[in-house]
Structures are given as structure tokens and as C-alpha cells.
Amino acid sequence: MIQTLLQEKYPVYTIAFDRSETSCKNVDDVIAHFKSRIDANPAVSYIGLFDHYAHTAALPNGVIGEGIRAAKNILFCFGKELPNPKVLAVRPRSIGVAEMEDGFVVTFLEAPNPAANEAMESWTKELRDRAED
């Protein structure tokens, strides 16, 4: 898992893996994996799914990067505390999944809650459930 700054200000975690490294066959399988982890955690609330690829493809001037076959975001919230209104600016959470020709790219924005980051990183690393051929 790599942590980078997107546009020099957004801390983003990224992992890319080949199809041979996962039992997931498509973007929906990856999303189903995350949904099962969200549902299993009583402190996390599932919100919904956003098909970013379909949205962008439907726009008259929509542009989709080369090699992207599908792209979806799963939306959820780690909401054990609401200490002040400013916290609302960094919630809810989203994990993005892009299906590429040879594999998948999973990304998420760093959360202010270390436990949320640890959970999202763990869920993502679980996707590598097969040894490379």
C-alpha cells in the first residue's frame, strides 16, 4: 500500500494488484468484499454505491482514463464520535475501485481516525488472497 499526496494536499492510500493475486473477477466482486467488511463492523454504517464510470461515460464531455474498464466508490461512515461540526467535513468515507485491463486499483483518502485507516488498509490488503502465478 502506497501513501501519496494527490494534488499536493490530499493524502491518498493506493494499492494496485494483478488479477492473479485475487479471487475477485471484477469491480463488483471487489465492492462486495468491502461491503461484507462494512456490514461486519458494528461501528461502520453502509451508505451506498456510486458508479463513477457510468456517471462520467454519460456526460457529453466525460473523459475516462486509458485502461479503466469500470470504476465504483463504496460509501460508508466510521461514526463512533461526533465531537464537533467540523468532523462532518471529513465524513463519510469512500473507497474507490478501478478495474483495469490486468487488475485493480483501490484508493481511499486518509481518515483523521487512525482506527478507520487501519481497517480500510486491512480490508484492502485482504483482497490479495491468492499467490502470484
Image (tube, rainbow, N blue to C red):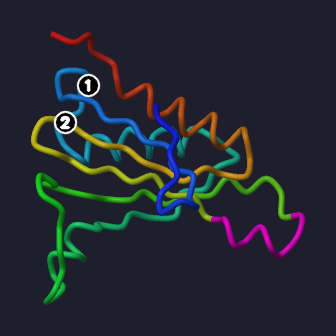
Query: Looking at the image, is mark 1 or mark 2 earlier in the sequence?
Result: 1
Left or right, residue 43 beside residue 3: right
Residue under the point 25% across and 40% down: 104
Q: Position of residue 28 (x, y in %)?
A: 25, 48
Report helix, strand or loop for mark 2. Answer: strand
| First to last magenta residue range | 83-91
Queried whether the magenta region covers residue 105, the answer comes back as no
Q: CA distance from mark 1 to mark 2?
A: 9 Å
Left or right, residue 41 beside residue 7: right
Report helix, strand or loop for mark 1. Answer: loop
> Residue 14 lies in what quarter of the image?
top left
Q: Nearer the viewer, residue 85 or 79?
A: 85
According to the picture, the residue beneath numbered tag 2 turns out to be 103
Q: Position of residue 78 (x, y in %)?
A: 67, 52
Check the image and report above or below for 20 versus 14. Answer: above
Number of residues whose C-alpha sits closer than 10 Å to that of mark 1, classed few (under 14), some (14–19) or many (20 or more): some
Residue 22 circle label: 1
Q: Nearer the viewer, residue 91 or 100?
A: 100
Number of residues whose C-alpha sits closer than 10 Å to that of mark 2, classed few (under 14), some (14–19) or many (20 or more): some
Left or right, residue 96 beside residue 113: left
Q: Nearer the viewer, residue 42 or 66?
A: 66
Q: Nearer the viewer, residue 6 or 51?
A: 6
Outermost residue on the bottom side: it is 60
Q: Position of residue 11 (x, y in %)?
A: 57, 52
Check the image and report above or below for 98 versus 128. Answer: below
Residue under the point 37% across and 44% down: 106
Residue under the point 24% across and 76% down: 55
Residue under the point 24% across and 47% down: 27
Tell me the chief SS of the magenta region: helix
Residue 101 circle label: none
- State yes or no: discs 1 and 2 in contact (Cβ < 8 Å): yes
